[in-house]
Image (cartoon, helix red, strand yellow):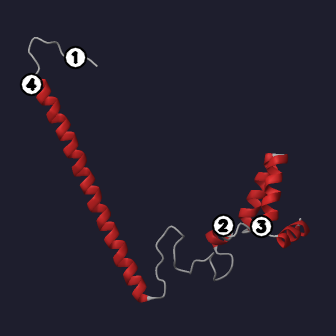
């Protein structure tokens, strides 16, 4: 298996992709196994899932420094204090704008609901007394 993997590595990613496609064409579990191997071994180009999760490369953790979270978490420091301060201020400003926008949307929805309710009540009050209520 390692000889085949070495030959495919020499050919580049296109060879691996072609093997995976052929595997799916022949029998889908072969293609799925090839895809799992490519992702697990880090041959897809974004690093091994295992190395990102568990840091098996010593001090290098899949592009993350020690003390930092995973890719979806805010990193603790970039090493540049001016940039870190700018990033922190920008993120705080964006979070405040998001809160303000959500508040605006809530007020807008409330105003729309109130206008619809007021219109309903006005229509109900102005309905003739002898007319039966309409059913939709």
Question: How many marks do you count on the picture?
Answer: 4
Look at the image and tell me in which quarter the C terminus lies: top left
Q: Are marks 4 and 1 in contact (CB under 8 Å)?
A: no
Task: Tell me the tag on residue 125.
Answer: 4
Q: Are marks 2 and 4 in contact (CB under 8 Å)?
A: no
- Say what secondary structure mark 2 lies in: helix
Dot 2 crowding, Cα within 10 Å, few <14, some 14–19, many 20+:
some
Residue 27 placement (x, y as % from top left): 83, 46
Q: Determine the CA span between mark 4 and mark 1.
A: 14 Å
Q: Determine the CA span between mark 1 and mark 3.
A: 68 Å
In this picture, residue 30 sits left or right of residue 55: right
> Which residue extends farthest right?
3
Residue 122 placement (x, y as % from top left): 11, 29
Q: Are marks 1 and 2 in contact (CB under 8 Å)?
A: no
Q: Which residue is mark 2?
A: 49
* Mark in front: 2 vs 4: 4
The foreground one among 64 and 133 is 133
Which residue is at 14% across, 12% downward? 131
Q: Which residue is mark 3?
A: 13
- Say what secondary structure mark 1 lies in: loop
Task: Tell me the tag on residue 134.
Answer: 1
Which residue is at 83% across, 58% downward? 19
The foreground one among 30 and 25 is 25
- Between discs 2 and 3, the one toward the N terminus: 3
């Amino acid at each position: 298996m390692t000889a085949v993997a070495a030959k495919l590595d020499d050919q580049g990613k296109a060879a691996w992709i072609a093997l995976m496609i052929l595997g799916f064409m022949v029998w889908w579990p072969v293609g799925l196994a090839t895809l799992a191997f490519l992702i697990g071994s880090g041959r897809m180009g974004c690093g091994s899932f295992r190395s990102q999760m568990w840091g098996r490369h010593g001090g290098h953790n899949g592009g993350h420094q020690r003390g930092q979270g995973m890719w979806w978490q805010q990193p603790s420091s970039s090493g540049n204090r001016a940039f870190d301060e700018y990033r922190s201020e920008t993120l705080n400003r964006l979070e405040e704008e998001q809160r303000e926008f959500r508040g605006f949307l809530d007020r807008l929805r409330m105003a729309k609901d109130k206008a619809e309710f007021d219109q309903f009540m006005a229509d109900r009050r102005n309905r003739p007394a002898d007319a039966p209520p309409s059913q939709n």
